[in-house]
Image: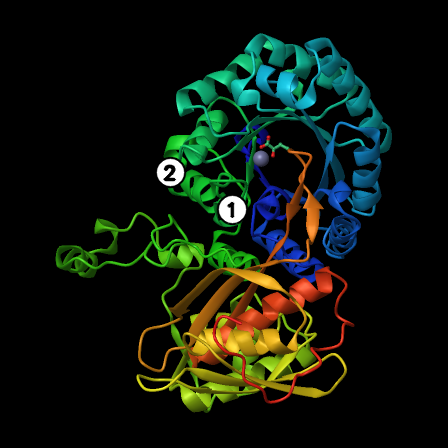
């Protein structure tokens, strides 16, 4: 592959993606996502914003140590990158977090649009130029690989932008990232901006030019591709396009556009496209951000054919209505794989084909759940296995675990739930509550045991496969009421943290309770509240609706 035909994939799911409201992940989940990104073949993992909080710093450090280390087989690990505002304090923290990686990178940024400089930074152009020179040079004292971003480049005066970038190059920046921070530009403009930078900035051709687009007008992917066509050779993207407001450019869209239209673009990445579906699911489960069914590449309907005329065409030749195969992106429709009589080895082999390498203890847990499910459901598909793993193996640390649940509901009487949880004290705690429906009642009963005041922001349920015996998957998002906040890199404000939870079961009320408990457990761990005793009166006691 010729060097100038290679497009680096810089994934910022763990930074810009995680920064978006509602996408908080625990350190363990971030590590699992980073491992998945490495398997997917991304070139750079932006692992976080270490100055945001000590937890964020520690999460980036763990990723640097565990995912950024050189592999025994000599394959280079991904670059591990930490974001820093253009200040010494942030740069120190970013370096502290990434230095253990075999290939560390510091990414520093400062806004260059008039509106940001005047109203947010309250800095003049001269002051911005001086800060860029100083801070990029400061980052270079630590690290040979420094990326600089002029924030809001899409709305910056191009001639000033060229000046800023020249100063960054002279101070030692090796990658120049051009963000359309507010998703304002059109593809023609953005492509023109990249071409202008390459033509008018001395030294730009010796750096990697990167593009980073937001999707406020739905043009992030088109802008990114236009930037690449104009000469950018790094694309900053997130899984499922999660990110600030309307999100960032989605990894799967850019990668599959380059892959599917290869004769048109004549460019390559080193992404293993078959891992895309799995990563999409993992990120959705961990963040609690559900993928819209009609989302390109990874939506549930992306490969569904409903209309009779389409189905007829598909039967005659798949290429009539499919420009890519679902298996190319790991979105195979619920392949029938295993049943009640399948053994542990068959499960291990299928999981490893799907990209999950479990240790013996994890395989034991997964096998137990698999057998339980096989007793209730005749055939177990890949989708079932993935839902079960998300639930069983990758669930957050359990401060409270579900021990038993009973509900009574229907057209007569009041929906009532009795919940028994095993608490951090090792004891069993029981509570009953009445609600507007069985899920509401069960959640109220949990709230009656666990001291974790929160607001339920989102609740969604869907069937993993077709059929009446399908596994139901529930995703919830909650926001703690006791102010778990983290620093927002760009707004310099503290934003409230939200927590996602995922649960799967053939009984959707059980799945709902598992999802809620997963989110609550994350909230407790993040707030350092795992040692808090349960509510005093956690005995059989009704809580009326509205309490
Ligand atoms: O959108 C943006 O400008 C950013 C920068 C920090 C690169 O995320
Ligand atoms: Zn961004």
Whole-percent x, y for residue 392 in the image: 59, 76
Instruction: Kindly state the secondary structure of the residue where label 2 is placed.
Output: loop
> Which of the two discs, 2 and 1, sits closer to the camera?
1
Q: Dot 1, crowdedness within 10 Å: few (<14), some or many (≥20)? A: many
Residue 349 seen in the current view:
no
Residue depicted at x 51% and y 88%? 371
SS assignment at label 1: loop
Mark identifier at residue 261: 2
Check the image and report above or below for 382 versus 42: below
Residue 385 x %, y %: 49, 74
Q: Residues within 10 Å of mark 2 (few under 14, many from 20)?
A: few
Q: Earlier in the sequence, mark 2 or mark 1?
A: 1
Report the front residue among 357 and 246: 246
Looking at this view, is 530 or 445 the one in front?
Answer: 445
Q: Residue lying furthest right in this view?
A: 141
Decide if residue 173 is on the left or right side of residue 20: right
Q: Quadrant of ligand 2?
A: top right
* In this rendering, position of residue 440 left or right of residue 430: left
Disc number for residue 446? none
Residue 190 picture location, percent across and down = 47, 22
Give the residue displayed 47% in from the left and 74% down from the top.
545
Query: Which mark is on residue 242?
Result: 1
Judge left or right: residue 364 versus residue 103. Answer: left
Q: Foreground: 189 or 439?
A: 439
Q: At 66% across and 10% down in the image, what residue appears?
A: 163
Label 2 CB-ligand 2 distance < 8 A: no
- The image shows residue 393 at horizontal and vertical percentages of 62, 73
């Amino acid at each position: 592959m010729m060097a100038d035909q290679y497009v680096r994939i810089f994934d910022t799911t763990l930074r810009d993606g995680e920064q978006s409201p509602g996408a908080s992940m625990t350190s363990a989940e971030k590590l699992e996502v980073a491992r998945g990104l490495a398997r997917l073949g991304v070139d750079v993992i932006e692992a976080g914003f270490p100055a945001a909080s000590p937890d964020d710093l520690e999460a980036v450090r763990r990723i640097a140590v565990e995912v950024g280390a050189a592999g025994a087989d000599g394959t280079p690990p991904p670059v591990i990158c930490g974001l820093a505002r253009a200040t010494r304090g942030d740069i120190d923290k970013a370096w502290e977090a990434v230095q253990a990686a075999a290939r560390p990178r510091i990414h520093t940024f400062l806004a260059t649009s008039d509106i940001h400089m005047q109203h947010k930074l309250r800095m003049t152009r001269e002051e911005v130029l001086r800060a860029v020179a100083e801070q990029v040079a400061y980052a270079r004292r630590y690290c040979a690989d420094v990326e600089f971003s002029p924030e809001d480049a899409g709305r910056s005066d191009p001639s000033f932008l060229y000046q800023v970038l020249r100063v960054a190059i002279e101070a030692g920046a090796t990658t120049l990232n051009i963000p359309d921070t507010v998703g304002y530009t059109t593809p023609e403009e953005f492509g023109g901006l990249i071409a202008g930078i390459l033509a008018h900035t001395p030294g730009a051709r010796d750096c990697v030019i990167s593009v980073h687009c937001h999707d406020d007008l739905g043009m992030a992917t088109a802008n990114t591709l236009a930037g690449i066509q104009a000469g950018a050779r790094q694309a900053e993207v997130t899984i499922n396009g999660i990110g600030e407001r309307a999100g960032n450019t989605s990894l799967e869209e850019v990668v599959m556009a380059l892959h599917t239209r290869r004769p048109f673009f004549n460019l390559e990445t080193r992404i293993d496209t078959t891992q895309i579906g799995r990563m999409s699911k993992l990120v959705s489960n961990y963040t609690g951000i559900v993928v819209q069914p009609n989302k390109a590449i990874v939506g549930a309907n992306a490969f569904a054919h409903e209309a009779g005329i389409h189905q007829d065409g598909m039967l005659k030749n798949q290429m009539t209505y499919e420009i890519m195969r679902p298996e190319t992106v790991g979105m195979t429709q619920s392949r029938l794989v295993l049943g009640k009589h399948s053994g542990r080895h068959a499960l291990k082999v299928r999981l490893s084909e799907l990209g999950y390498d479990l240790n013996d203890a994890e395989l034991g847990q997964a096998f137990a759940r698999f057998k339980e499910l096989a007793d209730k459901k005749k055939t177990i598909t890949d989708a079932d296995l993935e839902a079960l793993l998300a639930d069983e193996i990758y669930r957050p640390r359990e401060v409270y675990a579900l021990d038993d649940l009973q509900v009574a509901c229907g057209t007569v009487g009041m929906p009532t739930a009795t919940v028994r949880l095993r608490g951090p004290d090792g004891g069993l705690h029981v509570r009953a509550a009445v609600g507007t429906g069985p899920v509401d009642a069960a959640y109220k009963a949990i709230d009656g045991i666990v001291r974790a005041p929160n607001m339920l922001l989102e609740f969604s349920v869907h069937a993993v496969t077709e059929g009446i015996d399908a596994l139901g998957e529930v995703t919830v998002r909650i926001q703690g009421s006791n102010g778990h906040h983290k620093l927002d890199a760009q707004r310099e404000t503290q934003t409230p943290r939200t927590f996602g939870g995922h649960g799967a079961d053939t009984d959707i009320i059980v799945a709902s309770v598992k999802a809620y408990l997963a989110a609550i457990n994350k909230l407790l761990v993040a707030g350092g509240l795992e040692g808090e005793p349960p509510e005093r009166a956690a005995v059989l006691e009704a809580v009326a609706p509205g309490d």
